[in-house]
Image (spheres, rainbow, N blue to C red):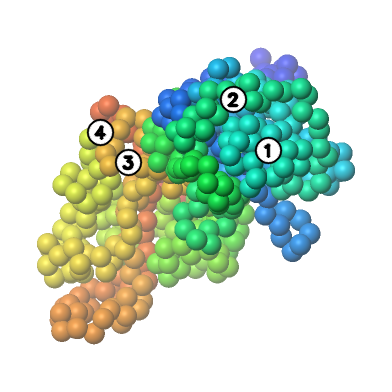
Amino acid sequence: MSRSFLVLLAVCAGMQPIRGADSSPWKVAPPPPASWQRDRVADLTARRRAVMDKIGERGVLILYAAEPRNYANDIDWPYRQENDFFYLTGLTQPGATLVLVPGAEKMREMVFLPKADPSLETWTGHMLLPAEVRAISGIADVFDATELNRFLTALIPRARAVLAPPGSGGRGGRGGRGVSEASSGGLDWKAILATPSLYAEREELQLFMILPVRPGDPEHLREREFAGKIAASGAGIPIKDASPTFEALRRVKSQRELDILQHAVDITAEAFQRAYAMAVPGAWEYEMQAQFEFTFLRRNAHWGYPCIVGSGVNATTLHYETNKDQMHEGDLLLMDDAAEFDQYSVDITRTIPVNGKYSKEQADIYRLVWEAQQAGFQAARPGHTSDDKAGGIQAAVNETFRKGLFQLGLITDENSAEQAKVWSIHGVSHGIGLNVHDPGGPELQPGMVITVEPGLYFRPDALDVLPKTPENEKFIHAVRPAFEKYKGIGVRIEDDVLITTGAPKILSAGVPSKLEEVEAEIARLRKALKSNPLP
């Protein structure tokens, strides 16, 4: 029976075709993991329980959905849910509010949902219904958003004067655009909240919210407004920042989260494969960006951060995002591009030779960066840190860099961290997850997912812009000959790493990074492209 006939049978039966089982040179990302939907409610329920354990029976958590952002006074930017709200609900509906009340007798988890409005749906699409919210989040108690103020005034009677009067409702729809009010449905909030409101009367209640990081922060403006009202009420209820609670919980990923992150890595690996094949002399940076974004979208993903595609000297700009230049013979191409799937973002960087072969000078720098990354991997173990403390990832990378740069004549003192920083100018590790820079911790723990991303950058003006001091003048004179050899080279190699109880697991190992493997993969894929169309 032929392979094509088996695929046809699978498609007719509604099954996913088996990928990678034939002789095709192209590796395509597999379907999303089964746990993504199967274990969603269990995952969300466990998180809410953990948050309630943290804040205690005298605590109440209030989380608002992210506000839509408008562009040109006409349309909204693509909506992305506030991370912590999504972490506890899985909901992508604007205008919703989550409330957790550990001290309540029965209703401890509630969502206040804007009423579906056909006049809005005509413009912006379907709004979630209560049954859908229950199915997605596992939260049984779903109320109309107009109930939120009744809830709040029952919870904190002494704040009634500064809260909106009962019946005025809360914001709804996409940022509160004209959702009609619904009746209370006979809810007796005073009875439902008898115990928490007693704590409030005794000034023992604590409200937890995500508060703005700094004045003028465009995020969490509703939280700032609400906190101001409670403070002005004289109710004696402190507003505490819930961010530390979420930072502690989000550091260590559940198995479902790890499965989602691996899927985002697999999608990214498929995109890198296309770039390895197509990033030839004469191609344009934006064409490689298009290959990444095309792959992300066709796999129901998005970029986790704007694509960085820098060729030649552009590779020495850390967050180069113009992506407008043409690639030339002899250029290196630095690609820092990764997918976000279901709001979980990964972070991967590769630096490849456009013509398929690294020059001697490019190879010198590339091998040093790769060796530094291997040292970082060895340090990525439980109990270690990601910084430059003894045994940390940054410390391991720095030590390798200092030795290698000294051998290449690019620093004059093998023990000088300051000299090495002229060429290595950024940290080498951060957490990933719902943010591309997700919460980390003082020590690495099994279940954390981090990056290891050393880089060396030889900007043409690097020596010219150093402060004019006698020490620097001496340094510049000594390293100038070596610098002229490596000037214009930028190399970063970044992988996503799961901390385990032993050796770390490199989630992105499927994207070749060792010099010989990169050259071999480029040659294989470019040869394949001549006779095998890209999938």
Name which residue lies at 81% across and 46% down.
178
CA–CA distance between discs 2 and 3?
A: 36 Å
Label 2 or label 3, whichever lies nearer to me, is 2
Q: In this view, does 250 lie to the left or right of 285?
A: left
Residue 283 visible in rendering = no
Q: In the image shown, does 509 or 6 lie closer to the viewer?
A: 509
Residue hosting label 3: 441
The answer to which quarter of the image holds residue 391 is top left
453 w.r.t. 238: above or below: below
Label 4 or label 1, whichever lies nearer to me, is 1
Q: In the image shown, does 141 or 5 lie closer to the viewer?
A: 141
CA–CA distance between discs 3 and 4?
A: 11 Å
Residue hosting label 2: 193
Label 3 or label 4, whichever lies nearer to me, is 3
- The reply to whether the C-beta atoms of the residues labelled 2 and 1 are less than 8 Å apart is no
| Quarter containing the C terminus | top right
Residue hosting label 4: 382
Label 4 secondary element? loop
Residue type at numbered disc 4: Pro
- The reply to whether the C-beta atoms of the residues labelled 4 and 2 are less than 8 Å apart is no
Q: Where is residue 71 in the image (x, y as percent from the top left)?
A: 71, 60
Q: In the image shown, does 482 or 226 lie closer to the viewer?
A: 226
Name which residue lies at 22% across and 65% down.
420
Q: In the image shown, does 431 or 85 lie closer to the viewer?
A: 85
Q: Earlier in the sequence, mark 2 or mark 3?
A: 2
Which mark, by number, is residue 149?
1
Q: Earlier in the sequence, mark 4 or mark 1?
A: 1
